[in-house]
Image: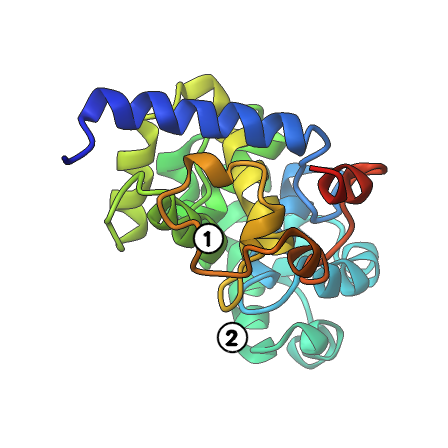
Amino acid sequence: MPESSLARTRRARRMYRELADFYPYAHCELDFESPLQLLVATILSAQTTDVGVNKVTPVLFARYPDAAALAGADRTEMEEIVKPTGFFRAKTDALIKLGAALEERYGGVVPGRLKDLVTLPGVGRKTANVVLGNAFGVPGITVDTHFGRLVRRFGWTEEEDPVKVETAVGALIPRKDWTMLSHVLIFHGRRICHAKRPACGACPVAKLCPSFGIGETDPGKALKLLKYELAPGRVAAEANR
């Protein structure tokens, strides 16, 4: 029998609560101290890891501390700095144009509204929601590859288009929880619910997941598949589940 809309909503909210309890420390893993720094780091994070971005941003932020500096950057010099993040020519172009747009339209200040952010070079809804949620405290859903994969596996939506995914999931989870929801699902996708071989046997929401069994179900073997660091005591707790 197909799951009703009400049942799906209740299950989705319960899964979110349990994941939030499992990852109470979930957060944006990009290092930043200002909205501009987060915006730049998020643009650089495309097709690479947050860890990789965090290795180059200290030098980048020191060399280009504001929008004006980004706009006036020497292209060759910036390309050399961001090269380790991949697609460095396109990213350099986006950052220089971003700096210019911020200077021309917003006095060098990153705007705090979605409709303004998405007009900036290199900024789509995903990037805008990262900045809104983590730099401005405005709830937003960040639909990256991990988020999209998990909500489809969880049976929350069958949508593939990121905007449609954002809308569908936003209807299930209260708006106040959207930013934290994004964090915990991305954490879960990176650590346990992997794309190719999810560690189903170590999953805290296995009993609520319709996709349980697509990965390793044996708890001991699943633990060996975990990536990144779990909070202290989590690995031991999972081993004793």
Q: Is residue 90 above or below residue 214?
A: below
* Frontmost residue, 151 versus 139: 151
- x, y percent for residue 97: 51, 62
- x, y percent for residue 42: 59, 53
Q: Quadrant of the C terminus?
A: top right
| Residue for badge 2 | 90
Tally of marks: 2
Q: Quarter-wise, where is residue 174 in the image?
A: top left
Point 41% across, 41% down: residue: 209
* Frontmost residue, 57 versus 209: 209
Q: Are marks 1 and 2 in contact (CB under 8 Å)?
A: no
Q: Quarter-wise, where is residue 216 in the image?
A: bottom right
Q: Is residue 6 above or below residue 129?
A: above
Count neighbours of disc 1 (C-alpha within 10 A) and say few if under 14, some if 14 to 19, many if 20 or more: some
> In what element is the residue under mark 2?
helix
* Frontmost residue, 167 versus 206: 206
Which amino acid is tagged 1? Asp
Q: Which mark is residue 86?
A: none
- x, y percent for residue 179: 52, 30
- x, y percent for residue 40: 62, 54
Q: Is residue 110 visible?
A: no
Q: Is residue 36 visible?
A: yes
| Residue for badge 1 | 144
39 sits to left or right of 3? right
74 sits to left or right of 5? right
Point 45% across, 48% down: residue: 147
